[in-house]
Amino acid sequence: MALTSRISLQGPPTSEPEDFLSSSLGVIFPDDVTNQHGDADHSLAYASPHLPRPLHIALADPDQESDRKLFSHYLWNASLLLAEFVEAGTIGLPLAVGRGELQASDFDVSGLTCLELGAGTALPSLMAALLGAADVVITDYPSETVLTTLRKNVTANAKPENSPRQTVTPIAVDGHSWGELDTPFTTAHRGRFDRVFVCDCLWMPWQHANLHRSISWFLKSSSPSSNSAQAWVVAGFHTGRAKMRGFFEPTALAEAGLEVERLWERDCDGVEREWVWDRGQEDVSERKRWLVVGVLRRRAEGVEG
């Protein structure tokens, strides 16, 4: 099943010519995939066959240029993919991941503490809270426009009746600017989390080092699960491979005490292939179909950079 098949627009009928064109791209260009979904006028319904009811996702209405530049007022395919992984891993669905090197159960969040950075709509965090995570904290840039929408989504969806378990983990929402580690929030949460979610946050190369620092700061040194504490990083190639690949550069990760455990690519239909640093000239429509999935962990002691 296609990655985007679970979502549908909610809200007033489309009226603008550009809206008609955008919604028709899949008909005009059958291979084209929409990788950003919704707007301030059209919320989203996320319908999983494994949840009792659809989740209703509101989108921020950025009224400041600084807010618009965050691009957190859309739901991106990276969030859809990680939410699907969390769901499959936690409730035990069959799912082939990591080119055969991983099982769906490797994305089980049962009883684990979870943090999302640059959350946008926070769909993976909502899924974790509904399926049995021990603790869920959602963060995004400390913009009141963005944080208000996040709190609205939590209030609307973090309810027992939306959970197949009929329970929901309490969720906290707070602002965090990557790399700023001297705030009351960062002090209170240092080394607290078994899992850190990062979805479509790699399009700003100048922020990679700050994002590395934040992941390392919040990630536990050890985890009660069979695996070590991990960061799950998913990002689309829509802005180009060159902009985002530096995030996974081993030396840069090592400076923050991190390393790659698994790294691969997956398209919107579930086809997987190996990660490569350079695929030459990539067609824009084709690369929009693909996402990179990375599993990061703390760097093993004694490994030289």
Image: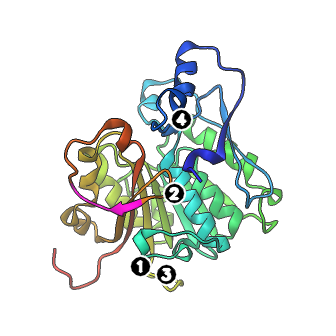
Q: Nearer the viewer, residue 68 or 49?
A: 49
Res 116 label:
2
Residue with the mark numbered 3: 223
Q: Is residue 102 left or right of residue 167?
A: left
**Nearer to us in this view, 208 or 90:** 90
Residue tagged 1: 221
- Residues packed near mark 1 inside 10 Å, few (<14), some (14 to 19) or many (20 plus): some
Q: Amino acid at mark 2?
A: Glu
Q: Is residue 62 visible?
A: no
Residue at (50, 28) in percent of width and height: 25
| Image-based side of 4 in relation to 68, left or right | right
Q: Which residue is mark 4?
A: 73
> Is 265 colored magenta in this rendering?
no
Q: Is residue 60 visible?
A: yes
* Residue type (three-letter) at the residue carrying disc 3: Ser
Q: Which of marks 4 and 3 precedes in the sequence?
A: 4
